[in-house]
Amino acid sequence: MSLGDPAGIYRAPELRQSSLVLGWSDDAGGVGRKVTEYLNRKLKGQEVAEIDPEDFFSLGGVAVRSDLAQFPESKFYACQAHELVVFRSDPPRVEWYRFLNSILDVAECHCRVKELCILGAMVTASAHTTPRQLFAVFDSAETKGSLSQYGLVGDMDYQTPPGERPTLNSFLLWIAKGRNLRALSLWVPIPFYLARVEDAQAQKKVLSFLDERLNLRIDFSDLNQEIQEQNEKLAQARSLSPEIDDYIHRLESNLMLSDEENGELIKKIESSLRERS
Amino acid sequence: MGIRLYQEPRLENPVMVASWPGIGNIGIIAVDTLREMLGAEEFGEIEPWHFFYPKRVLIRKGVLECLEFPGSKFYFRTMERGDLILFVGEEQPAEGGRVYAEGKKAYCMANLVLDVAEKFKCRRIYTSGAAVALTHHTMKPRVWAVPNSEGLIREIRGYENTVLMSDIEGTGGQGNITGLNGLLLGVAKRRGLEAICLMGEIPVYLQGLPLSYPKASKSVLEVLSRDLEIEVNLDKLDELDEKIEPGIEEFYRQIPLEVRGQLDRLRHVTYTEPSEPGPITEEEEQRIMQEVEKFFKRRGEGG
């Protein structure tokens, strides 16, 4: 088995003690992709390295999404003024351990990363109007203690249910823990009917934490505008369809919908957001 | 990527018995039962992270406590007539949604297992798996044995309830052993190590079900324990079989009458000598296989 370095470094960023924010491109609600894109855009992130897809993805063809041919990307961006490194990638299909270690090799050896923040979204049976919380899992009690002032919900007890597997985020957190790299994994709830579209409110929740934690001083006026527009579209969809309104109202009252109703709500919301965009 | 030995037991003239999960979990149940019955002691493992995706995470009060991987563990037991090393692989290191290992990782895993076999100077390796056969679930499963050297054929002919591939009707001595239970045999051959794969028969109509088939594990263990001259109480496998049997019967009743009629004929196939043909002709065998395939195709299409 080849164990050569799969990472290509374009240029060594001048960083002294940076943080790495990592997001997966296929997250629910577009959280991983949009948050990393937003950080790069706002903080002028520059591409500094990438991981070659050859060993980690099935390259027997290309996937087509939104009419476009896709190709797996795993790229590092440096926002030097903010001591921040952003990594965005498609989740690897094979050789996970090697892939995840390669990320941390680049981060620690070339970017002097001292803290890792992994972005994640969890699909929930809640309404978009329910105030969002930000859940976190930490590599250690020390990290948890040092981040206590940010309002994260960090008391989760969990074990993988039978028949399921841990997430890639847990795998990465475990590897970081083994390397004594301070790390946390964030989980923002996404209402199930927004999982396949973009959930601006969830993105803002994550970005607000990062802004405060990393002292980024981001101007969120554009994102606030986006949230407002999305909320208006959803409110309009509710006013035009008593069925949508009923479903969301029941979710707001902590009532469960049937599988059929869930499917119906997803379909109606997605088509309603598409029509109005 | 490597082997971790917690201790280095002194073993005399050991034999290694290895298995990974496969159809009906026949091999893995046989080896695991042997491990349990003999009270074999764990002494090492293959480091899992290069081979497997984790199977379980434990988070307590927001802190990640541990991440568990499928195990690939070595056990030993000293015996009067030659010691034993058992290897139990909880999963095959498969990629891309495949069930069976293949390619570089499989080859690497096989070599690591054999590194341990060579380190402790094992005189022979056994692997174990399933043989999909035209047999009935009410019949006692035979054991198909495949050695990796000519010199073992005569010995195998002396095993009870055991056949070589050339004894199997219609195979002409040809076939494949998928995954690591087979690959280990080949890699052992390459390294000059003697190895035999023992495969318990599972009826063709049960191969796709997510069921264990302990009846065949028992047949494998009977052969293995006789060959190794060890006594193993197999009551546990009978109990397991009793639990699983109603599920098999229930499934069997769901098979359409015309297919079941063909399969029922397999109840009466007896093998007094391994190479003696049963009362079903080759043409009839083909027809039964076609009917079974058609049934599963219809089932898969939701018909």
Image (cartoon, helix red, strand yellow):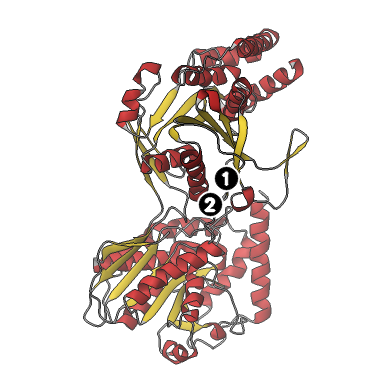
Q: Extreme left residue here?
A: B80
Q: Extreme front residue here?
A: A14
Most foreground residue, B266 or A109? A109
**Residue A92: image tag:** 1
Across and down, in percent, residue B245 comes to: 43, 60
Disc 1 secondary structure class: loop
**Residue B32: image tag:** none
The chain letter for the residue carrying disc 2 is: A
Q: CA distance from mark 1 to mark 2?
A: 7 Å
Q: Is residue B177 visible?
A: yes
Q: Quadrant of residue B88?
A: bottom left
Give the crowd class for mark 2: few <14, some 14-19, many >=20 residues within 10 Å: some
| Residue drawn at x 69%, y 42% as measured from the top left | A71
Q: Amino acid at mark 1?
A: Pro
Q: Amino acid at mark 2?
A: Glu
Q: Are marks 1 and 2 in contact (CB under 8 Å)?
A: yes
Most foreground residue, B146 or A62? A62
Give the crowd class for mark 1: few <14, some 14-19, many >=20 residues within 10 Å: many
Q: Dot 2 corresponds to which residue?
A: A95
Q: Is residue A251 above or below residue B141?
A: above
Q: Is residue A134 above or below residue B26?
A: above
Looking at the rendered structure, the number of numbered marks drawn on it comes to: 2
